[in-house]
Amino acid sequence: MRLELQPQRKGGSRLANKRLSMPHQSETAWNKRMNDIAITNDDGFSVVEKSSETMISGKMLKFNDGRYTVDKTELLPPDTVLAAVGSITAWVHWVDGKPAEHRITQSGQQHPEREELPDLDESAWPPGLNDEPSDPWRDTRYLHLIDPQTGADYTFVTDSFGGRRAVHDLKSQIANVRFAHPNAVAIVQPASTTMKTRFGLKMRPAFKVVGWRGKQEKAPPQAIEPHKGSINDDIPY
């Protein structure tokens, strides 16, 4: 199929003219005009792009020292609210400082123990912190989040005990609510809490559920109003 670009007519498109006229009209009128634009199923936004072989969608979130960083360069605002839309449980095999293999545990499967994976000989492990042998397999969680206001994608990535605990707690809450509301989506605020370690109290991530989408609230039963008509106790014969 050939795609031919038509030359732009003088004055630009209707949408461009609307954008240019925005300063001369109220915000309400502008919003009404934008809502009047028909949205069709063939607008091209449903075309699936070829995705790269990565577990991370959008920007990467990491937790460190009680704060969340976005792509390792900026801090996530503390009042950020996101929708939790998916998670991945996987063992990740690292080679030369890069993830080389993902063994993803599918829904309904039991996540393997470390002893069920290869590379059990610690003497063959690469050197890590303080030149101690470093396990090349890391028990990792990927939590996919979406900003409900902007539609931006985020993926929280962790292979620490505290991070896995945060994802586990959230998954447990979602499973409990979905028992009664199968389509419920948790709205969470990335937060932090403390946990006990052999080195004392340490900060760990936590995802505070602040609301739900798709959770159908049942209407309370309505009281039966008493009959207002006259009461006739006569028994006809």
Image (tube, rainbow, N blue to C red):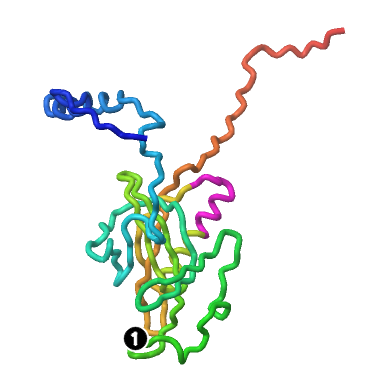
Q: Where is mark 1, residue-wise?
A: 129
Observer-nearest residue: 160 or 54?
54
Question: Does residue 26 appear in the picture of this structure?
Answer: no
Q: Residue furthest right?
A: 237
For the C terminus, the image quarter is top right
The residue lying toward the viewer, choosing from 230 and 85, is 85
> Position of 157 compared to 74: left or right?
right
Kindly identify the residue that appears in the image at 55 percent across and 35 percent down: 220
Are there few (<14), some (14-19), or many (20+) residues within 10 Å of tag 1? few
Residue 2 horizontal/vertical position (percent): 33, 34
181 above or below 2?
A: below
Above/below status of 51 relative to 3:
below
Q: Is residue 157 magenta?
A: no
Residue 16, given in percent of the width and then of the height, sits at 18, 29
**Magenta stretch?**
172-184
Residue lying at 37% horizontally and 62% vertically, measured from the top left: 156
- Left/right placement of residue 214 relative to residue 73 reads right
User: Is 174 one of the magenta-colored residues?
Assistant: yes
